[in-house]
Image (tube, rainbow, N blue to C red):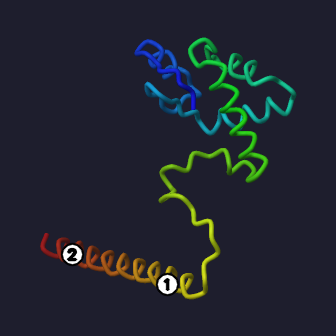
Amino acid sequence: MSQKIFNKDEIKRLSENPYVKAVSEKGITYTDEFKRLFIAEYDKEKLPRQIFEACGFDIEILGLDRVYSAGKRWRSAYRSVGIEGLQDTRKSNSGRPSERELSLEEKYGRLEAQNNLLRAENELLKKLEMAERGMRKKK
């Protein structure tokens, strides 16, 4: 990760770029669209710096280390997983994926827990629906 800290003016300028999802003092989150564009342009043999500059980023603000490391990370993700590797999954992931192979008992336990959760959700939805019906009848 880059050691560069963004000041308030730099944060403001970066956040105005349509390819920036979020920016803080220490980091920047790019849109999935920009990552796909980056890969497409890189395949056309453009350099990471050229791609960032063409998309309106000021390299002096970002720093070359951040530009090249982001490009390297996205290319690696694209090579290993494909286009899905470029998507920001922080909201949909619950944590680090398990690296080891699960035993049948562990798989069964997880499926049973998932099944119980779905049953509880269904029961809650039924109760809400019944409560709504009761409210409608009272009116």
Q: Give the residue at x 80% y 30%.
A: 42
Q: Relative to the observer, which residue lies in front, 72 or 23?
A: 72
Q: Is residue 74 left or right of residue 129?
A: right
Q: Give the residue at x 59% y 28%.
A: 19
Secondary structure of residue under mark 2? helix
Q: Which mark is residue 109?
A: 1
Picture coordinates of residue 88 (x, y %)? 57, 45
Q: Is residue 77 left or right of residue 30?
A: right
Q: Quadrant of residue 35?
A: top right
Q: Give the residue at x 23% y 76%.
A: 133
Query: Do residues under tags 2 and 1 come within 8 Å of each other at their CB atoms?
Result: no
Q: Quadrant of residue 121?
A: bottom left
Residue assigned mark 2: 131
Whether 16 is drawn above or below 37: the answer is above
Amino acid at circle 2: Ala
Whether 40 is drawn above or below 133: the answer is above
